[in-house]
Image (tube, rainbow, N blue to C red):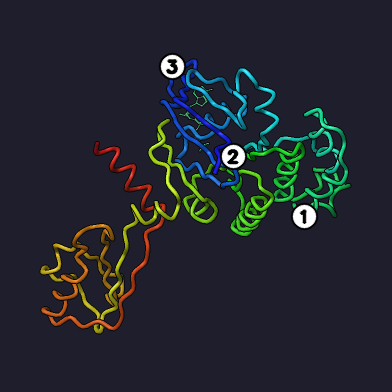
Amino acid sequence: MASIIEIKGLTKRYASGFEALKGVDLSIEEGEIFALLGPNGAGKTTMISIICGIARASGGSVTVAGHDIVRDYRGARTAIGLVPQELHTDQFEQVIDTVRLSRGLFGLPRNDAYVEKILRDLSLWDKRNNRIIELSGGMKRRVMIAKALSHEPRVLFLDEPTAGVDVELRRDMWKLIGELRQTGVTIILTTHYIEEAEEMADRVGVINRGELMLVEEKTALMKKLGKKTLSVVLADPMESVPAELAEWNVTLNADGHEIEYIFDTQAERTGVSSLLRKLGDLGIGYKDLNTKQSSLEDIFVSLVHQEKAA
Ligand SMILES: Nc1ncnc2c1ncn2[C@@H]1O[C@H](COP(=O)(O)OP(=O)(O)OP(=O)(O)O)[C@@H](O)[C@H]1O
């Protein structure tokens, strides 16, 4: 797949001297959904702001659809739709007018059929004549997306698309973003919800303290770094974990019916069979065994720990 964004050696030092980006290299492929995942203050918004021409880089280069963001700002910016973290738009304007206006700001001729399509895609067509102030929070967010799409960009940036929204709305947003991808637009979203990256992204970049710690296909990331948890459902409850199981570092659940063992699927010896043998030796019977994959949350926590230790 061809890349649509090329970021090389990107740095950002704020006037305060704070280094928010410390040499980021990243290439985004056309048509993918890329999640930039990181804790508060990691540098996600700074990176998006630079790519979108809102903030100036201190060093490095970025091209969007082949246009250098500094030398050919207009070309780069035209290829981008940005849905910022904060919702700002004229509250008294009608939905359809605000979307038409956004398109006009890019110097494009009026195109009622296209505007109708995006409003329909975003389930806003029925509300097209409403003033923004009359819409619910979720609808307002969708208006921001419609505005960002109004000039037919090739890349859509969503800066924390579901920050502060309830679970139901978050699921709607995920579905919507999945549908937008079907239209061929490349989507880059920032999030600190691991669940969100896990749900939607093709690839995930983990950023922490201005450094891109890793970029991986989501499934490969899960496989590579994923640990698994083995749950052993006991035939009879235990009061405490026998000393003989200390080397596996197992935990006993509150009612004593289940023990859990976390193991590395990539390790030469996972410890699973030796644990089960030991249970047999100790005469501890079990009724069921389950394993489950660790989430990105676990992966992220272990990455940050590894970095701290280094
Ligand atoms: N104008 C500024 N001047 C100085 N420091 C800044 C400025 N803007 C951001 N920073 C700092 O740069 C770092 C990165 O901020 P940024 O907003 O990019 O993080 P983020 O990953 O988007 O975080 P969040 O998830 O909280 O939105 C933070 O430590 C922040 O305090």
Beta carbon of the mark 2 residue lies under 8 A of ligand 1 = yes
Q: Which mark is residue 159?
A: 2
Identify the residue at horizontal 39%, vertical 41% (top origin). Answer: 214
Residue 91 vertical placement versus 71 (above, below): below
Tell me: 195 left or right of 208: right
The residue at the point 64 percent across, 36 percent down is 84
Marks 1/2: CA distance? 21 Å
Say which residue label 1 marks: 123
Image mark for residue 8: none
Residue beneath disc 3 = 17
Q: Is residue 52 above or below residue 296?
A: above
The x, y position of residue 2, in whole percent, is: 56, 40
> What element does badge 2 sit on?
strand
Mark 1 and mark 3 residues within 8 Å of each other at the beta carbon: no
* Three-letter code, disc 1: Ser
- The kind of residue on which mark 3 rests is Gly
User: Local crowd at mark 3 within 10 Å, few (<14), some, or many (≥20)?
Assistant: few
Q: Crowding at label 2, few (<14), some or many (≥20) Cα neighbours within 10 Å? A: many
Point out the frontmost of discs 2 and 3.
2
- Sequence-earlier tag: 2 or 3: 3
Q: Nearer the viewer, residue 129 or 121?
A: 121
Which secondary structure, mark 1? loop
In this view, the residue in front, 130 or 157, is 157
Q: Secondary structure at mark 3?
A: loop
* Rendered residue at 30%/75% (across/down): 255
Q: CA distance from mark 2 to mark 3?
A: 24 Å
**How many neighbours does mark 1 have within 10 angstroms: few (below 14), some (14-19), or many (20 or more)?**
some
Q: Image height check: is 50 above or below 196?
A: above
> How much space separates mark 1 and mark 3, taking CA atoms?
45 Å
